[in-house]
Amino acid sequence: MPDNDIAALAGQVLEHLRRSGRRLVTVESCTGGLIGAALSDIPGSSDVLEGGFITYSNALKMSAVSVPETVLAQYGAVSLQTAQAMAEGGLMNAVDADIAVSVTGIAGPGGGSVAKPVGTVCFGLAVRTGLSSVVQCHFAGDRTSIRSQAVQQALQMVLNA
């Protein structure tokens, strides 16, 4: 997705958050902060963007956003269970946020397997009201394209929340 399309979607997310009176926290692994960057590139985003966690390693997933070691051991870092735990942990650790979105995946070019090929990306969404959802996608393309598609999916999830 071209950067200007992501910027437009990020603008829609910020307006949606303003209208709903919510603040967002991001918890990112394979996107490495791209979701937060897309949102914070827009002036005035600080009124609804609480911040974000970049939890690339399993150790930081556990220490920063409280992903249980048992979840990582049983399901792996790229799983719906980990994505949900990341979102819920991000919300728990960002006390002024009302909604959290998480992303964990395999952007490539290496790191994939038969069970989890390159392009497998899992997303979590947690809302302080107790609602949560998870989605798994399989994106095609190179690393840049997969990460861009992941940013778009995460922003769309927030917009639809």
Image: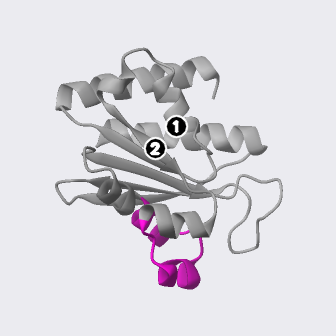
Q: Looking at the image, which residue is at 28% across and 28% down?
A: 16
Quadrant in the rendering for residue 157: top left
Residue 109 % position (x, y): 83, 53
User: Which residue bears the numbered disc 1?
Assistant: 35
Q: Is residue 70 above or below residue 32?
A: below
Q: Looking at the image, which residue is at 74% across and 58% down?
A: 118
Quadrant in the rendering for residue 47: top left
Q: Whole-Å distance between the Cαs marked 2 and 1?
A: 9 Å
Residue 117 % position (x, y): 73, 64
Q: Looking at the image, which residue is at 69% across and 58% down?
A: 106
Q: Amino acid at mark 1?
A: Ile
The reply to whether discs 2 and 1 touch (Cβ–Cβ < 8 Å) is yes
For residue 137, say whether it is visible: no
78 in magenta: yes
Q: Which residues are magenta?
A: 66-86
Location of the N terminus by quadrant is: top right
